[in-house]
Amino acid sequence: MVSWVLKEWQAAVTALLQGETILLLRKGGIREAKGQFSLAARQALLLPTVEHQKAALLKEAFRPLMTGEVAHDDQVRFDGWAAITHALPLTAEAEVAALLPYLVWNEQFVAERLNWQPDRPIYGLLLRAYRFQQPLMLPRHRGYSGCRSWVETGQEVGVEHSTPALAKADYTDQVNAILAALPAVMPVVP
């Protein structure tokens, strides 16, 4: 059962659910406690948003995943969810640069994230994504809007009827490659 939502750029959510990435970078939204990212949950529905999404900050290969506006009616559509298996606190530019091959974002995005509140770490989240057989529709509430990473749904949602975006062995291979690129970074577990 899942009761939290993780908001992310629509193109990044699509890439996760298609198995094209397992890595997100988070630094925290303006509406988060002290503007600092924290792990609210280990499992979350993935909410695609176009808030702050810019084609110029995506790698060319991921720009076609941008499909435009996400509907703003009284329902919110979820095509999948993810389990966060690792959270990597990154404090050095070289650490984040080592992750570029695994990101949907380009060097400009990484530089902007590093320069925004440079005293705070960026978290690399490794997510095992799952697609729902049928989209899940939940009532929209005002918590879904605004610059924040996490939203509580107000209910528990079953996720047992979903398909992994990547086979377990493929996911494990990618996790191992990312961890090998960051030998000095100790993952934190939520």
Image (cartoon, rainbow, N blue to C red):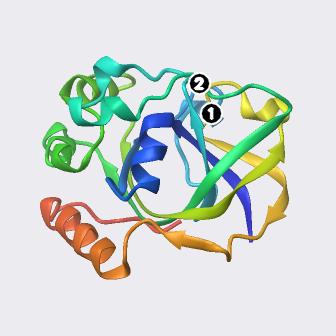
The quadrant in which the N terminus is found is bottom right
Q: In the rendered structure, which amino acid carries the disc numbered 2?
A: Ile
Name, please, the residue furthest toward the bottom: 169
Residue 177: image x %, image y %? 17, 67
Which residue is labeled 1 in the image?
148
User: Quick check: marks 2 and 1 in contact, CB under 8 Å?
Assistant: yes
Residue ID at (43%, 29%): 66
Cα–Cα gap, marks 2 and 1: 7 Å
Question: In what element is the residue under mark 2?
Answer: loop
Q: Nearer the viewer, residue 29 or 80?
A: 80
Q: Nearer the viewer, residue 65 or 6?
A: 65
Q: Nearer the viewer, residue 156 or 115?
A: 156
Residue 123: image x %, image y %? 39, 48
Residue ID at (35%, 21%): 55
Residue 80: image x %, image y %? 59, 57
Residue 153 horizontal side relative to residue 47, left or right = right
Which residue is labeled 2 in the image?
30
Kindly indicate the quadrant of the structure image that contains residue 188: bottom left
Mark 2 vs 1, N-terminal side: 2
Residue 33 horizontal side relative to residue 119, left or right = right
Question: In what element is the residue under mark 1?
Answer: loop
Does residue 70 lie above or below 185 as drawn?
A: above
Nearer to us: label 2 or label 1? 1
